[in-house]
Structures are given as C-alpha cells and as structure tokens.
Amino acid sequence: MSVILAIDIGGTQLRVAVYPTASTTPRVVQKTPTRGQEQGVYDRLVALIDSVFPKDEVVEAISVACPGPTNPFTGVIASTPNIPAWKDFPLAGMLSERYKVPAYLGNDANMAALGEWKYGAGQGHSDVLYLTISTGIGGGVISSGMLVVGTRGLATELGHMVVLPGGPLCGCGLRGHLEAVASGPAIARYVNEQLAVGCSSSLKPGPNLDARTIAEAARQGDKLAIDAYAQAGEFIGQALADFLHAFNPSIVIFGGGVSQAGSLLLDPVRDSMERHVMNPSYLDGLQIATARLGDEAGLLGALAQAHIRLSSTS
Ligand SMILES: [Zn+2]
C-alpha cells in the first residue's frame, strides 16, 4: 500500500495527515501548536512528520498547504503571516531532500479551493469560484478544470480587490479592499464605529466584539447587527459580480467562519451580486453553495494537489 502525506500550516496548529493513496480518509492526523513566533518551527514540523512517516510503505508525495504568497513551481514560501522566520523559505525542497520523495507546496486558500472542487461542494464542476470569509478574505479559482495560480503562484487574491476607493486600511497595507470592509474584523469594526457615534443596539462596544456575537444579535433582531452583515454582503456581492465577469464560474462556494452566518450574509450577497452583474447570463444556472470540508479543506486540498501533480509527471 502507498500513502500521501498532507500538511496544513495553520495559524494555531501544524497538522500532518497520512492518506492511503486511494482514500480521502486519513489513517492518522497528528498536530502540534504552530508557535510561529518562536525558533525551531521547521524542526518541530519535521519531528511531527517523523512521528507518522510509514516505515514499510511507499510514500508517493508530501504536499503542503501554507498561508501567504507561495510558489508552487519552486516550492518556496515567499512569506507566511504566522511564521515570520520563513522568508523565501524553500520548504518543499527541504522536505523532498530529507524524505527522498516528491514534495509540493500551495497557498492554503488555493488548496481549500482544490479540496472543495475535488472532494467537497464543487464536485462535478469545471469552473469553481471559492471565497473564504473569516478574519481575512481569500479565494481560489478553478477555470476549465485547472487551478488558476498565475506565473508565480500569486493568483488569486480575491480579498484584495478595491471595492471602496480610499476606504479602510486593509491588512495588506492598502485601502478599500474587500477584506477591509467585509471580513469578520471589518464587520466588528463597523459595529464599534456605529456604537461610538451613539447608534442604539444590544451590542456592547469593545475590542472583543466579534462577527459571531454580532450574528447572534442579528438573529435576535438587533438592527445594527443586521445592518453590519447587510453592508458586508453588499460589498461581497459587488466583488462577486466582478469575479463572475472575470471567471464565469458555474458554482460559487463560500467557506470560512463568517459565512456560517448563512442567510444573514448570503441573502444580501445574492441581492447585491444580481444588481451588479452586467448581464443576467452570468447568473444562468449559477449555484451558490457553502463549503463542505470545514477544517479539513487545507489537508484535503493538499491531497488533491499531490494527486494532480503526481499524475502530471507520470
Ligand atoms: Zn488588501
């Protein structure tokens, strides 16, 4: 029997899963806290891999999902937000050298898109747009059955499109990006700003106010909370219309914790998308779905990446 090792470099945890080659159910998953500010993250990752590396079986490949700009062609992480020491870090090459197997690397949002396409909500489609909305906004695009990565693997940063010129500062340092007006922290910031100018609400201002608490208040009928989600949905729908124009997908899949607000967010998204689309043909047969793989999207996407890369080299 042969296996594939999938690795997810998360903000809080490093995870390694061992998948029998023909399966999407891992035989074992091991994890350790990322503690990315400390030294020795790579050594701890290697120790984690060693602990599950099979001794008597063929390992077909190691495949990694990692946040931040990564180059799938060279296997180099340009930078990754949770581990400052990994700058121009040739992770795939190091793993391939150490374990004597092919090693692949991909951006975590792209890997989640691949996972949802191959094993989740996007199965059967050839043109998939995946948008994850949580503390940031990321995305991935499958176009004509291929993951869109661009020339250096930097595509497709769907959260960093300008939807409000001159608007709030984004985590990337620029202004008015979708992430800056529709991510979880952006929803909370909007509510805090409105509370500060005297808007009445059941919510209490403060740094701990988060999108989940606001969603609960919205379900109790809190108008400010409902408005905050409606505004985020308006911006997401506006950006989504642009994405439809660019990629013409047959399905849009929403992932990430903020999307779990369901119709509170997705009804305004759909309404805004329909108003901003240049031609109703883009909406013909378009499916809107929520992600199915949850926390496993990165690992399963890395698994899908391994299968795709292995079959393209054989
Ligand atoms: Zn940005």
Image: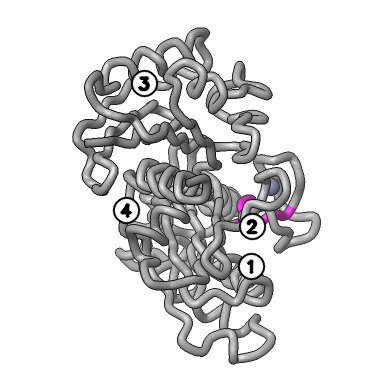
Tell me which colouring the rendered structure shows: one colour
Labelled pair 2, 4 in contact (Cβ < 8 Å): no
The answer to whether 268 is drawn above or below residue 22 in the figure is below
1 or 3: tag closer to the N-terminus: 3
Query: Which of label 1 and label 4 is nearer to you?
Result: 4
The N terminus sits in image quarter: top left
The answer to whether 6 is drawn above or below residue 84 in the figure is below
**Residue carrying label 3:** 33
Q: Is residue 157 visible?
A: no
In the image, 277: left or right of 283?
A: right
Residue stretch in magenta: 176-181
- Please tell me which residue is depicted at 49% across the width and 77% down the height of the picture: 250
**Residue carrying label 4:** 293
**Residue carrying label 1:** 239
Magenta-drawn stretch contains 39: no
Q: Amino acid at mark 3?
A: Pro
The disc placed on residue 178 is 2
User: Can you name the residue that lies furthest to the front here?
Assistant: 314
Give the spatial CA distance, label 1 vs label 4: 24 Å
Labelled pair 1, 3 in contact (Cβ < 8 Å): no
Query: Which of label 2 and label 4 is nearer to you?
Result: 4
In the image, 151: left or right of 194?
A: right
Give the spatial CA distance, label 2 vs label 4: 24 Å
Query: Which of label 4 and label 3 is nearer to you?
Result: 4
Q: Nearer the viewer, residue 44 or 61?
A: 61
3 or 2: tag closer to the N-terminus: 3
Q: Position of residue 264 (x, y in %)?
A: 40, 68
* Ligand 1 has an atom within 8 Å of the beta carbon of the residue at disc 2: yes
Crowdedness of circle 2 by 10 Å Cα count: few (<14), some, many (20+)?
A: many
